[in-house]
Amino acid sequence: MTLTSEEVQAQRSWFEEHWRDHVPFNREIGLQIYSWQDGLVRARLPYEARLSAHDGIFHGGVLASALDTVGCGAIVAGHDFNLGNRFTTVTMTVQFQSVAPHQDVEIEGVCTKRGRRINFARARVIALDGETVAEAMLTVSASGQRPRVGTDEQATPRI
């Protein structure tokens, strides 16, 4: 079955809103997606003490989760939904290069290659002074149909 252009646009809009507002873990850590373009997603992650590993420093797992979310989002943004709409991170490597003490960070994800099923992205955490804190390479599968795509998530209770 081939989707109409209206159906493709409806899925793009649904996924963008879903990523921004309805992923419970993104809300839990305070991830704020502020830019969603074909193949490019940007977000801000405010520092909170509850997200730290050591006094004043983000926990690496929180940063890795943000890299995964934003990198995968870059693949979703601009994806051909005729190829499926169930996205799964297959592999992700993260290199931590620095720390961002007591400060918010930016996360940027870029889709680097699209395939019929397997897609690739690069994501990075950037300190407010422009220094790269961490980088990730992601391989993401896009296949099958995700349940409930297109449903109204406005009624979904917020955590």
Image: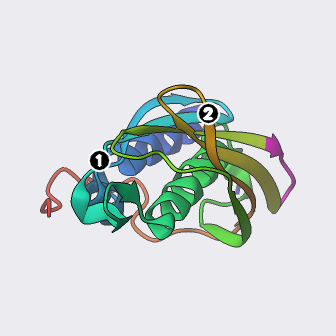
Helix, strand or loop status at disc 2: loop
| Quadrant of the drawing holding the N terminus | bottom right
- Estimate the spatial distance between the alpha carbons at disc 1 and disc 2, rounded to whole Å: 28 Å
Q: In the picture, residue 27 is in which quadrant? A: bottom left
Query: What's the residue at 57%, 54% (across, down)?
Result: 67
- Left or right: 154 in relation to 145: left
Which one is in front in this view, the residue at disc 1 or the one at disc 2?
A: 2
Q: Quick check: 61 above or below 158?
A: below
Residue at the disc numbered 1:
21
Please identify the quadrant where the C terminus is shown. bottom left
In the image, 78: left or right of 18? right
Q: Is residue 6 visible?
A: yes
Write down the quadrant of residue 49 in the picture. bottom left
- Give yes or no for contact between labels 1 and 2 (Cβ–Cβ under 8 Å): no
Q: Residue at x 14, y 56 (%)?
A: 155
Q: Tell me which label, 1 or 2, sits earlier in the chain.
A: 1
Extent of the magenta region: 112-116
Mark 1 Cα-neighbour bin, 10 Å: few <14, some 14–19, many ≥20: some
Locate residue 65 relative to residue 71 in the image: left or right.
Answer: left
Kind of residue indicated by mark 2: Glu
Q: Position of residue 14 (x, y in %)?
A: 42, 45
> Is 13 or 72 nearer to us in this picture?
72
Residue at the (39%, 66%) spot, across then down: 148
Name the outermost residue toward the front: 55
Q: Residue 49 lies in magenta, yes or no?
A: no
105 in relation to 72, above or below: above
For the residue pair 82 and 61, the one nearer the viewer reads as: 61
- Label 2: few (<14), some (14–19) or many (≥20) C-alpha neighbours in 10 Å: some
Q: Which residue corresponds to mark 2?
A: 131
Q: Nearer the viewer, residue 30 or 23?
A: 30
Residue 99 x %, y %: 52, 50
